Image (spheres, helix red, strand yellow):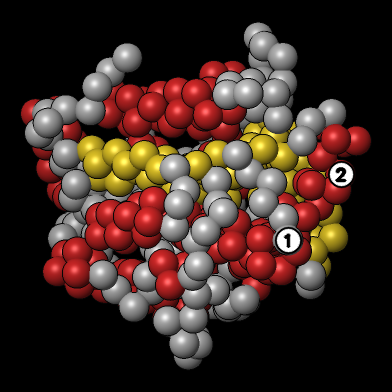
Amino acid sequence: MTPIPSEAPDEVLAFNAWVADQTRHAPPLRKVGAAAGRKAREDGRSILGRPRLSTRASVRTIDGPDGPITLRTIQPEGREPGGIFLHIHGGGWTWGGPHHHDPLMESLADQTGLVTVSTSYRLAPEHPYPAAPDDCEATALWLLENGPATFGQELVAIGGESAGGHLTAVTCVRLRDRHGLTPFRAALLTYGCFDLRGTPSMRAFGDQPLILNTSSIDWFVELFAQGHDLKDPDLSPIWADLAGLPEALFTVGGLDPMLDDTLFMAARWKAAGNRASLDVWPGGIHAFDLFDNDYGRAARSRMHRFLNAVLGES
């Protein structure tokens, strides 16, 4: 087991310098625009490279609140399935898709025995709030009703990163408040944006060229919220009643503008009576766990161990 270091390793600092060098001259996202940003991601012109699709993934569509929702499923290999993990992708509620996470979902499935189901949702600005949380809620309800017959498994865990971490928290609260359901036993809340008004670390981050910064977050929030009250708990779940929610692992890098969102939300999660673990990875930037390097692999391995420990409990 690789422990979290007490300070940023040299290789992490070198990686951060490489990211900054690759992105410092990129135009602001506000100038790039949503459509061009999506195309760049699909064409492999983003810092994350071209999406790597799994030959093991199967795709189905279900009826959503306003059109079809795509579910991308990967079954575990080498062990018996032990439940369904609902994954919600990031991308500032504006771009991204379930196919962007195939290698991560393969690894999670094989290391935990969970059937991974990564959901699409309608994207801003064409489909602002509440489209994305409505679709994620609909997917969770569909899996609860149809998971046993379709996959032979029950929905037991949920998780997402960045905007997906935000939508994960919102989905948990919505299922409890709107449907009286608390099905999840474990949640991965990975550098989510939990207070859309902007926490101190987000406001102080400035325009550092490290994947995400203050101006890009402001732009994403504008496209998603489009004038809605940012203190509404359905937009900023840090303001929600968090009682009765699943045991959660909060993960964030020490150089992520979402640092305070994670610190504050983890504290509120525990204060509400839930079990929670908090991992702060020194020197980690936003999305550090998505890269295929030692730090990214260590963070993902920690998430797998967390799921195995929680879901293995009787």
Q: Which mark is residue 180?
A: 1
- Residue displayed at 29% across by 73% down: 198
Note whether residue 122 is visible: no
Dot 1, how many residues are within 10 Å of its Cα: few (below 14), some (14-19), or many (20+)? few
- The N terminus lies in which quarter of the figure? top left
- Where is residue 56 shown, x and y percent of the image? 69, 25
Query: Which residue extends farthest front?
Result: 273
Residue that badge 2 annotates: 146
Q: Nearer the viewer, mark 2 or mark 1?
A: 1
Examine the rendered structure and indicate whether residue 24 appears above or below residue 298.
Answer: below
Examine the rendered structure and indicate whether residue 220 appears above or below residue 98.
Answer: below
Confirm or deny contact between disc 2 and disc 1 (CB under 8 A).
Answer: no
- Where is residue 110 shown, x and y percent of the image? 59, 19
Examine the rendered structure and indicate whether residue 18 appears above or below residue 266.
Answer: above
Question: How many numbered circles are shown?
Answer: 2
As helix, strand or loop, the secondary structure at mark 1 comes to loop
* Camera-side residue of 52 and 293: 293
- Residue displayed at 69% across by 35% down: 84
Q: Quadrant of residue 212?
A: bottom left
Please state if 267 lies on the left or on the right of 69 as rendered.
Answer: left
As helix, strand or loop, the secondary structure at mark 2 comes to helix
* Camera-side residue of 237 and 78: 237
